[in-house]
Image (spheres, rainbow, N blue to C red):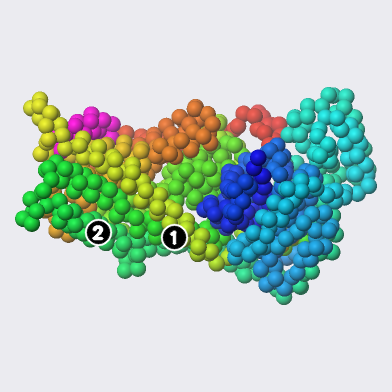
Amino acid sequence: MATKIALAGNPNCGKTTLFNELTGSAQYVGNWPGVTVEKKDGRLKGHKEVVIQDLPGIYSLSPYTLEEVVARSYIVTEKPDAILNILDGTNIERNLYLTTQLLELGLPVVIAVNMMDLVQRNGDSIDLEKLGKALGCRVVQMSALKGQGSKEAAEAALAAAKEGSHTEPPHVFTGSVEHAIAHIEESVQSLVPEQFLRWYAIKLFERDEKVLAELDLDPELAAHIEQHIADCEAEMEDDAESIITNQRYAYIQTVVQQAVRRQPRKDNMSLSDRIDRVVTNRILALPIFAVIIFGIYSVAMGGYSFSLGTKGTDWANDVLFGEMVPGLLDKILCTADGVPRVAEWLYGLIQDGIVAGVGAVLGFGPHILVLCFFLSSLADLGYMARIAFVMDRIFRRFGLSGKSFIPLLVATGCGVPGILATRTIEQDRDRKLTIMTTGFIPCGAKLPIIGLFAGAVFGGSPWVAASAFFVGIGAVVVSGILLKKTPAFAGEPAPFVMELPAYHTPAWGNVLRTTWDRGWSFIRRAGTVILVSSIVLWFLQGYGFVDGVFQAVEDNNHSLLAALGNGLAWVFYPLGWAGEMAWKATVATFTGLIAKEEVVNTFGVLYQYAGEADLMEDSSPIWAAVAADFGVMRAYSFMIFNLLCAPCFAAMGAIKREMNSPRWTAFAIGYMCLFAYAVSLIVYQLGGLVTGEAAFGPWTAVAVALLAGLLWGLFRPAPRPKAQTGRMARPARETG
Amino acid sequence: MMPLSMAKPGETVRIRRITGKDEQRRHLAEMGFVLEAEVTVISQTAGNLILKVKESRIALDKAMANRILF
């Protein structure tokens, strides 16, 4: 049987960095609490029989949020062979709080004090031997970020697991508490395994709901235990839980006094504190954030001389997939005078189907790489947790907490981990609301859509690119307000409590790996899903019934795909999708459900074949064709609809898993589609009226009605919740 | 006693009382907010605080900060 070693510790103490180091995995690490929300296992390098288990960070064995439940139930119910408890050495007191609880579990524990390099840089020292002696377990030191000491830590844990023994847990509590615990131990001795007796007794003393439910004591015994707790509470003049908490900290303080020597700080304010004063400043915080986001999008997607991403994408579109690849293929596929050596249809499939379709998508690779590089640098720096704090003030106004902002930022990479990241949100209804709105954020796969329209129709305007981000945030805000006024979501969000990590220079290895992972998954999809659908799309748009005979068609407006698209295009007519672009846009929207890159892929295949390419001399031929077919408002309406409507199948799957209810899943996806439809309709009909693209008509009235409805939903007074629960609950006083 | 949201940036105070619902009070305790702990206010925006307690930096909103008295 495999030996199981669990990595446990406070959030953001370096568990996943260590896990990656020990197992050679590439799990995502970031500098904010709550990066890991699911347990992950891997084999220890060099010891194939050892399984290392990475767990979400926890502050204690009493879970507060959903991802903490994951960690607690693993440690408590699956009982690993050893626990490797990682401590942040710079904050040892708080970290030892969890340690005292882990030691009570009766499992072999090894402590690894992480960030020892920082401890030493502060001029402090930790006496590992004294610490180990006081706590009764082995203590090693390491620096996970620098890769120092991690192997030794794993080996110590492995040795402890093999020995299987554990020393007596330290006596953390004082006389009368220990007395009560001893009585409880005596009462439940026959009900729980001996090894875990102390842990169960302490949990019963704390009146832990989970343990009470698990043991299901008979009423007489429960009353007997309750008497002991009540006696102790009366003597200590405090409630049982507080007694335990306070005594733990008191005990930790004595241990720390023995083992840790602290250099007096010259200045009470560290560099992180100084930075925080600026970036969380009440006036400057939001402008700073807006400037950072605008700056990142400018470099990634703007039209400036420093816009690296745009330069790369231009090169990929114009040179690589505009000349080089087609040129090279021409050399292979054609004779000297330009006549294809292979069948005409095969030549068409390769050049117009695959190169145009896959190339159209791949061309946006540089955009994605640059954007992902900056966003993951920002996350690694430690800014993410700050922005959650800053946004809390604003999000709270419409009933969400700042914690909802982190999933949204994660979703800028990919919606699936974004939806998973909602597990750090304490309240179920807020979590559901955040899951529903996470899909509004432009993820990496939606970038090509933004890039295509910003580049083709809006002349590379960084405003359009950045506006896509702010439209996403706006959609979250508006939905938050709308839904919070419905009974299912009404209620105050949980108060905001979040640890802010110290800023550190991004670990470039991590940043580059994250960037590469994102880029690689993009390339891989282009080579698989996108490639296959390019081929399918090419056939569907190249063949059709003309005069009742199935044949290759000259004009793809007569193709099978056009027939399909036209059959459904009426749905989108109110959004301004009319004329020849209607069926193309409709098809692109539906293929976008497979993966959002498909939208651009579809345009690549459809417009390449249209033959308009030769007429345009400048820039990417597809871009010019798109620009010719889409007016400004039409393009914007299409872009908004595709950014906001149902996400790709992978994200819908994640929604289904996290909602864990078919009704909620259907509601979430239905809401997204309807919301996207309404917003696009309003934008096109009213915006088009200004630009002259849309005529005044019945749809204008519908747009005005929708807008009015939206505004009513936003500004109507919040209905009074029927049964108010929570801390502030008090009987509603009716005023006559 | 005064709520923590009244403390000024740069000020270091000692916690005298924590009120509120059990679950949140426990969570505060896990993060280091216990009686007699010293807390330094790093920044303050409209009642929302960034605090330093036991060498860690913790952000609290106004509602939570009002439950901690010094």
Q: Which residue is mark 1?
A: A373
Q: Return the x and y of residue A625 as percentages of the image width and height.
A: 18, 49
The correct choice, above or below, for A155 with respect to A563 in the image is below
Q: Which residue is mark 2?
A: A320
Q: Does residue A559 belong to the magenta stretch? A: yes
State which chain disc 1 sits on.
A
> Which stretch did the figure color magenta?
A556-573
Q: Quadrant of residue A648?
A: top left
Q: Mark 1 and mark 2, same subunit?
A: yes
Q: Mark 2 or mark 1, which is nearer the start of the sequence? A: 2
Please state which of the two labelled residues, at mark 1 or mark 2, is closer to the viewer: 2
Q: Quadrant of residue A432?
A: top right
- Residue name at image x 39 percent, y 35 percent: A673
User: Pointer 1: residues within 10 angstroms few (<14), some, or many (20+)?
Assistant: many
- Residue name at image x 33 percent, y 50 percent: A448
**Closer to the camera in the image, B53 or B68:** B53
Q: Return the x and y of residue A611 as percentages of the image width and height.
A: 13, 47
Can residue A656 be seen here? The reply is yes
User: Pointer 2: residues within 10 angstroms few (<14), some, or many (20+)?
Assistant: some
